[in-house]
Amino acid sequence: MPLPSTIQTQMDTFLGKTAGLNDDHQIDDIAYTMRVEAKTGDYTVLASESGTVFVGTTADNDFTLPTREAGLIYWFIKASNHELRVTSDVTQKMTAFNDAACAYVEFTTTAEQIGCGFMVYCDDGLFWNVSYIPGLVAATAASA
Amino acid sequence: MPLPSTRQSHMDVFHGMAPNVDDNHIIDDLAFLFNVVAKTADYTCKVSESGTCFTTEGATVAVTFTLPAVASSDNVCYWFYSAEDVAMTIAAPANTMVAGNDATATSIAFDQATQIVGAGAMVVCDGSLWYAFPIRGQGDTVITVA
């Protein structure tokens, strides 16, 4: 027997809000948003944090990626004039800047770092693939 | 009266599949898709449009996208894509954008003729600032940060 449309499900919803359909039949309360986390120093990223935008502030940041698992994806951006490095969980399993087997990528040049970032995802071959997102055209990134 | 947990809702779901929660308590069947919306004139983005990819497809004049207030935009994100050779500006509330070696910027603009089509940005907010991830259409695409 169909239930009346006003009956809600027992699912937990975003911030505890009750799910409801808007005029376009979409559930507003579970709209797509991104988790944003600020870090003031080195940090080992967790697999469970896939999809997170990490914002590096205050000091140099070295983000170490978790054990490779296809589909994991992270974003990193620098909000202060300090270095940003993203390091693979193991060496030679990262592709970036025409380098098919590196261990890390980084922005280290003073006065270029704010607004620079990387998008990193793990593919089916268990490589971390890096997209370089320079804040300035000439921002210098490096890999090794 | 609470309903039994095995009872399904009557929501329409992706490809008509019933929602199921996997071992990580994620609903696998609600696949992520973009809401792609073209704008041909200036537009103020809504918090409720988080996750939308705005394009300038069809625009014949410059388009400015205005981002909502930071306090109400925690975790909100948007994508922007320049689809026409007209300037595209993404404007935040004054001094609340991090972009292009500027921690207190207000806007970024793709406004250099012949370098616009194919460029864009993803922006995300932490409740205090908008962070811009520029996507250059070509390696030397110049972005105006103001």
Image (spheres, coloured by chain):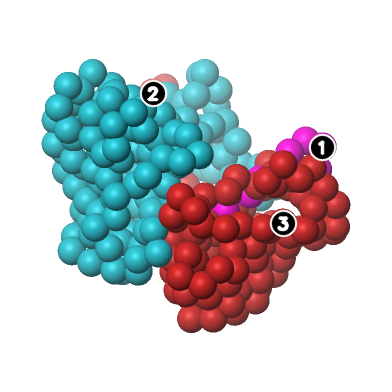
Picture quadrant where residue B51 is located: top left
The CA distance from mark 3 to mark 2 is 59 Å
Give the residues drawn in magenta, as a range: A118-127
The kind of secondary structure element at disc 3 is: strand
What letter labels the chain drawn in cyan? B
Work out which quarter of the rendered image holds the N terminus of chain A and state it: top left
Q: Amino acid at mark 3?
A: Ser
* Label whose residue precedes the other's in the sequence (1 or 2): 2
Residue at image coords 25%, 54%: B107
Residue highlighted by disc 3: A143
Indicate the position of residue B24 as horizontal and vertical percent values.
Answer: 66, 50
Residue at image coords 53%, 32%: B31
Residue A61 visible here = yes
What letter labels the chain drawn in red? A
Say which mark, if any, is on residue A2: 2
The kind of secondary structure element at disc 2 is: loop
Of badges 1 and 3, nearer the viewer stands 3
Residue highlighted by disc 1: A125
